[in-house]
Structure formats: structure tokens, C-alpha cells
Amino acid sequence: MIQIELYVPSTDRSFEFEINEHAKISRIIEELTSIVAAQTGRAWEDGSTPLLCYQEAGTILPVGKTAYQCRIRPGSRLLLV
């Protein structure tokens, strides 16, 4: 498990999460959107596909790779859009 910082522009809030570095990005996105929706009381828009990005570089993480393969490390700052 690694700790990351997640910024969600639609809520204008940052969150800290622990994610499994061996989980695929697609699964991490599912978990994060569910937790953010529960914490903010705002559901994700139906039909939209959230994307996980490196906050600094603005690069989209490929959903078929694991967090480890994407080089997500402790303290990484990610963006959920």
C-alpha cells in the first residue's frame, strides 16, 4: 500500500488515500470515485469515465496498467477528472 494525494477539481478538494500498488488503474479509479462520492455526497456523473492523471505532468494514466507500472510512488500527487 502506498499513500497518495488526490485532487478532485469537481469538488475543489484534496484527499489522502492509500492505494494498492499492484492494482490496475481502472480498479483504483473505481475505488477512488466511490470513496470521494461518499465523502462529498456528490455522485460521479452518469456516463462519464473518470480519468486518473499525474497532477504535475498532466499525463493520463493507462487503465490497463498497475500503479507500480505507472511509477506511482508514496507521496505522488494525482488528479481525478
Image (cartoon, rainbow, N blue to C red):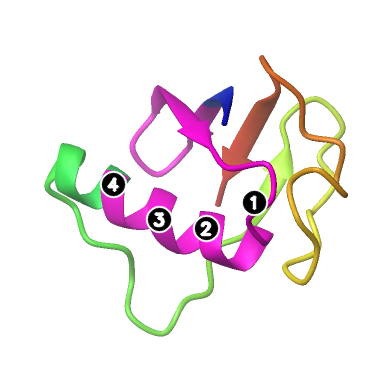
Residue underneath mark 1:
52
Quadrant (top left, top right, bottom left, bottom right) of the N terminus: top right
Q: Nearer the viewer, residue 10 or 79?
A: 79
Mark 2 touching mark 3, by CB under 8 A? yes
Residue at x 55%, y 52% (from the top left corner) = 81
> In the rendering, at what x and y percent does residue 54 appear?
76, 36
Q: Nearer the viewer, residue 39 or 12?
A: 39
Residue underneath mark 2:
29
Residue at x 77%, y 71% (from the top left corner) = 64
Amino acid type for the residue under numbered disc 1:
Leu
State yes or no: residue 32 in magenta: yes
Q: Is residue 17 above or below residue 60?
A: above
Residue underneath mark 3:
31
What is the CA distance from the residue labelled 4 to the residue labelled 2? 10 Å
Q: Secondary structure at mark 3?
A: helix
What is the CA distance from the residue labelled 2 to the residue labelled 3? 5 Å
Q: Which residues are magenta?
A: 6-35
Mark 3 touching mark 4, by CB under 8 A? yes
Q: Secondary structure at mark 4?
A: helix
Q: Nearer the viewer, residue 3 or 35?
A: 3
For marks 1 and 4 on the same chain, the one whose residue lies earlier in the sequence: 4
Amino acid type for the residue under numbered disc 3:
Glu
